């Protein structure tokens, strides 16, 4: 039998799982990272419209892990966020002071993956197993074992589920998350446009769902670019995806009210269904969940990846503290500390995004007027705006060391 040993076995080598492996390696903790995807496909040339907002706290994590230098020239700073109810009067403009810097940075997911794979390749403590499929997972009093389809057996002292929303590790372990379907689908695309976005991220709320325009760096040819996340009812999604490009652009332009001038489609449309799930428990015997395996939410505030990276920072700190004391990385006390640390933050963010989704989804003139009145009030209240910005930047609460400024 072909067996390989490491301290931790991480199932899922995406933006959360692989970043966890890099953080553990920096702390002297070895890992196997198992992923069923092909890195070549994940980093193929071309812009596919998939992009992520990286908060200030997540950027601090990348700096600590040695990824910031490669990423710095590729990200578009978010100078402000404009929140509006269907482009009507009464919007909120979140704009930090000079001392705070930007509200975050927007990255094409491809660029994040390239930097992540390069950082992982520099760490001898990481054994990466791409294009791999898990056949069995076993956890016991003294360790964990994962058998792959090709017969390899990976052993460790802690198993981490990082496979995303459909995590088989979570489901097999018997976790019972609260979950529901919003009956909506996110349409993802890339846009080029005549006018500069001015580093402004737009969150436009329509009764059918939010419509987000996320700023990206200009292309090599100087063309202005943004990522689009358009939420539509599930019953309408097939028709939207089947629209000819010209018709689709026309529908998008109608919702943009000309803020970017003439627009064109720069990437094929993709989509995914929107749902919610949240697990109260994120640990079991020699098992921890991170990222979307533990909490999946509406992309309304762009916090999904950032919340997963906060899981990473907390778990790295807990396990490295334990390792310095000579404790087993699968020690139940360490895992309980991780669960306590992440419980309040994940619940608050998940609940807030759900409430916002439902609040802005109420149709009619009266709900719209009430929303715009409230937004106008927030616009005038500096301390409240500051609180919202700190939340968006990930700089509130009890921060792990990796999330603090380097």
Image (cartoon, rainbow, N blue to C red):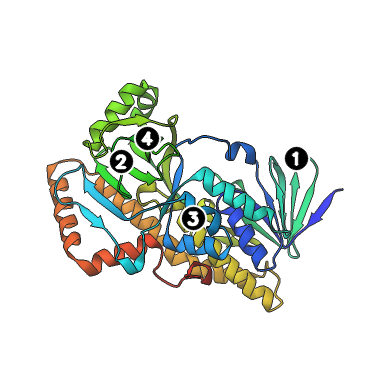
Between residue 215 and residue 314, name the one nearer to us: 215
Does the CB distance between marks 3 and 1 fall below 8 Å? no
Residue pictured at 30% horizontal, 43% vertical: 196
- Which element is circle 2 on? strand
Farthest residue in the top direction?
244
Would residue 31 be found to the left or right of residue 193 on screen? Answer: right
Residue 314's quadrant in the figure?
A: bottom right
The label number, if any, that marks residue 149 in the structure image: 1
Which is more foreground, mark 2 or mark 3?
3
Between residue 375 and residue 57, name the one nearer to us: 57
Residue pictured at 41% horizontal, 45% vertical: 217
Where residue 223 appears, x then y in whole percent? 38, 37
Which is more foreground, mark 4 or mark 3?
3
For label 2, the residue is: 211
Residue 246's quadrant in the figure?
A: top left
* Neighbours of disc 4 within 10 Å: few (<14), some (14-19), many (20+): many
Q: CA distance from mark 4 to mark 2?
A: 13 Å
Q: CA distance from mark 2 to mark 3?
A: 27 Å
For label 3, the residue is: 72
Which is more foreground, mark 3 or mark 1?
3
Q: CA distance from mark 4 to mark 3?
A: 22 Å
């Amino acid at each position: 039998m072909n067996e390989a040993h490491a301290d931790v076995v991480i199932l899922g080598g995406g933006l959360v799982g692989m970043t966890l492996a890099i953080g553990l390696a920096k702390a002297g903790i070895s890992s196997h990272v198992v992923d069923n995807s092909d890195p070549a496909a994940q980093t193929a040339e071309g812009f596919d419209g998939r992009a992520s907002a990286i908060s200030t706290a997540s950027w601090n994590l990348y700096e600590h892990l040695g990824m910031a230098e490669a990423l710095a020239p590729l990200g578009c700073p978010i100078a402000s966020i404009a929140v509006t109810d269907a482009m009507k009067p009464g919007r909120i403009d979140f704009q930090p002071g000079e001392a705070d810097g930007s509200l975050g940075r927007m990255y094409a997911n491809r660029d994040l993956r390239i930097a992540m794979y390069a950082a992982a390749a520099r760490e001898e403590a990481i054994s990466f197993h791409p294009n791999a499929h898990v056949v069995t997972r076993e956890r016991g009093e003294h360790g964990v074992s994962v058998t792959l389809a090709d017969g390899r057996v990976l052993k460790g002292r802690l198993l981490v589920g990082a496979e995303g929303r459909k995590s088989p590790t979570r489901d097999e372990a018997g976790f019972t998350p609260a979950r529901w379907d919003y009956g909506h689908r996110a349409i993802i695309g890339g846009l080029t446009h005549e006018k500069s976005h001015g580093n402004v991220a737009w969150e436009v709320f329509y009764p059918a769902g939010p419509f987000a325009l996320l700023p990206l760096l200009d292309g090599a040819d100087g063309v202005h670019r943004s990522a689009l996340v358009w939420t539509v009812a599930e019953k309408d999604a097939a028709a939207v995806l089947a629209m000819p490009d010209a018709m689709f652009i026309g529908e998008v332009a109608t919702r943009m009210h000309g803020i970017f001038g003439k627009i064109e489609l720069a990437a094929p449309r993709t989509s995914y269904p929107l749902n919610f799930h949240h697990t109260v428990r994120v640990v079991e015997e020699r098992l921890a969940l991170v990222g979307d395996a533990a909490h999946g939410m509406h992309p309304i505030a762009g916090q999904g990846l950032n919340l997963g990276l906060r899981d990473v920072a907390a778990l790295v700190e807990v396990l490295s503290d334990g390792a310095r004391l000579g404790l087993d990385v699968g020690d139940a006390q360490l895992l309980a500390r991780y669960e306590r640390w992440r419980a309040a933050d994940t619940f608050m963010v998940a609940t807030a995004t759900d409430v916002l989704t439902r609040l802005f989804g109420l149709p009619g003139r009266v709900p719209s007027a009430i929303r715009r009145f409230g937004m106008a009030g927030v616009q005038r209240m500096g301390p409240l705006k500051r609180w919202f910005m700190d939340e968006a930047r990930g700089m509130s609460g009890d921060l792990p060391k990796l999330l603090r400024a380097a």
